[in-house]
Amino acid sequence: MHPRMDRGIVRRSVCRPVRSEPTPFTKGTTMSHQTYKNCIEACTACAVECEHCGDACLGKAEMADCARACRDCADLCWIGSAFMSRGGLAIADLCRTCARICDLCAAECGKHPNDHCRRCADACRRCAEECRRVAA
């Protein structure tokens, strides 16, 4: 007879909650989306501006580097927001990379006089600053 069966009745083990200890990723009892609120907001705002700027620059040969930088930056900012929202692993490493990409995008967008490029560069600078705070 199977060890978990007794007279045809299946015995079920009792599930007990595992005590969760704070980790460097969760920073105690505060939810990760609260811990990283400012950086999540900065990354999201940057991603939105980069998506807009990248789209506006697509198809213009002289703006190819700007469009490429914006698309890369937007992708990384969306990912960073998601990682911080759920308390993902290696947030500090991701934020260091995000800050670097935001700096590159801000420098590229800063070369152009378009309003969308200026807004994007400003959002990238704010995001890089917040990401550096989280990565520290």
Image (cartoon, rainbow, N blue to C red):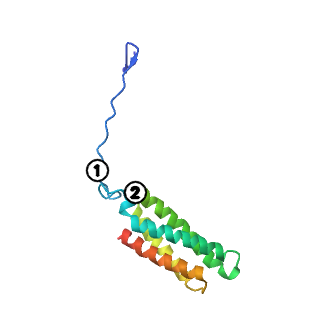
User: Residue at left 39%, top 73%?
Assistant: 132
Rendered location of residue 36, percent (x, y): 38, 64
Residue that appears at 53% across and 69% down:
47
Which residue sits furthest front? Answer: 115
> Mark 1 is on which residue type?
Glu
Image coordinates of residue 32 in percent, x first then y, are 38, 58
Q: CA distance from mark 1 to mark 2?
A: 14 Å
Q: Secondary structure at mark 1?
A: loop
- Element type where label 2 sits in the image: loop
Asked where in the image residue 12 lies, by quadrant, the reply is top left
Q: Residue at x 67, y 74 (%)?
A: 58
Indicate left or right for 29 with 64 as reference.
left
**Residue at 60% across, 75% down:** 53
Across and down, in percent, residue 79 comes to 50, 62
The label shown at residue 87 is 2
Left or right: 50 in relation to 57: left
